[in-house]
Amino acid sequence: MSGKNTCVIYAPVDTLSGYGSRARDTVKSIIDLKKDEWDIKIIPCGWGNTPIGFTNENPEWKFLQDYFISGQLTSQPDIFVWITIPTEFQKVGKYNIGITAGLETDIVPGDWVEGVNRMDLVLVSSEHSKKSFLDSKYQKQNPQTKQIEGTIEITTPIEVLFEGVDTNVYKFLDTSNREIGALNTIPEEFCYLFVGHWLQGDLGEDRKNVGILIKAFFELFKNKKNRPALVLKTSMVGPSYMDRDEILKRIQMIRETVNSTDLPNIYLLHGEFTDEEMNQIYNHPKVKAMVSLTKGEGFGRPLLEFTQSKKPIIATNWSGHIDFLNPEFTSLINGNLTNVHPSAANQWLIKEAKWFTPDTGQVGHYLKDVYENYKNYVDGGKRQGYYAKTNFSFEKMTEKLAEYLKRIPEIPKQVQLKLPQLKKIELPKLQKVD
């Protein structure tokens, strides 16, 4: 029998999603670290309504298909790795690892805590995510007697495994880069860029805070002779015409709330882009800075990727992205924690949870000052790029993962019992006695 540990990974590696990107990077690191020691298999799963088939469309990731399996497991694996949400975590292997981004709020639901406690080790994307799990404590009530039977809280070790940026893909390009033709047609030479989904929620309540960003941008630069533009790389669900039209309708509804007809331009980039194309967008000479008024991030991957363009960043001063955005080099907006609005709530974002509401005065200050005094922020962008590359690269993530995998105890192997070969015993011949 093979002396290798068997490792099965359940993950959305074949989906076109943020979680898919996280899963692919993590799985690649595991393969790089353990392919000589472990017999690794992957069970690819879906992720919401996102498209499947990423590995077929991206040749550099097609190698993952060599590890794909389907159907039922025929034996218990030594190590089982879940890369998904904690409610799906189950004890399958002899040693079980859960990997999750967590939630964007200050606490997580009770069933997420219970899911974490089914694992032997859990890895989350940020210090914010780790804290939100540890701060989540609930009283356990007997459903029949209604008596309190104890407290549900985290008992499993939780560690942070950040999502390292691939600096071979996301990197500084010469400012003459104009590969993305749509941006070339924009008349403005100064554009703010936002990247992220426009999720459910009333104005000022959606998680990425896209509505408030648009409203603030309109109000701040209305009736101004010289003004920047705002480029939104966003969608609600996916790259459909209906999705695009709904985004445009939302922008128009916000436009109509502003008391002016002389408003700055907002441009929509809608559809799917490769990593290389996103890097070209980040480095386009008309894109001068990234802005995010997000209410909460488990990590904030686009912000990390943008750092490698060495341009200024304006972002909120709370949640996952604070791990890699150095306050010395970026413009971080303060604010307060507020309850998740019912219009943004779902089965995971519970009514007791809070997330971040940025200070509108600081939003206006930084949008205006970065535009008018851009040269004051250029050096910070460069230093932030170096800081992120040095401390939050894919290679650094792999090094951190290697440390955590060393914690896996030695797993006893089944050995085939070999009996000693017995010598044949010659019995004496018996004679019949009269």
Image (cartoon, grey):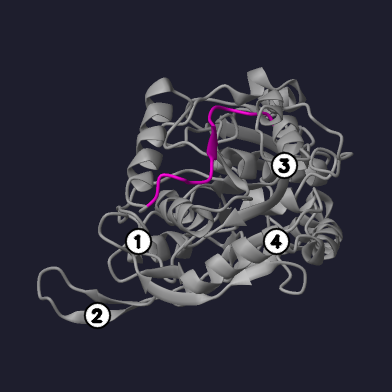
264 in the magenta segment: yes
Number of labelled discs? 4
Badge 3: how crowded within 10 Å, few (<14), some, or many (20+)? some
Amino acid type, residue under disc 4 in the picture: Glu
Where is 151 relative to 345, above or below?
Answer: below
Residue pictured at 42% horizontal, 68% vertical: 355
Label at residue 372: 4
First in sequence: mark 3 or mark 1? Answer: 1
Secondary element under disc 2, as helix, strand or loop, is strand
Front position among marks 3 and 1: 3
Q: Mark 4 and mark 1: span between their CA atoms?
A: 48 Å
Label at residue 111: 1
Name the residue that disc number 3 marks: 189
Where does the magenta region start and end?
260-274
First in sequence: mark 2 or mark 1? Answer: 1
Q: Mark 3 and mark 2: span between their CA atoms?
A: 63 Å
Picture coordinates of residue 330 (x, y %)? 72, 67
Residue pictured at 53% horizontal, 74% vertical: 131
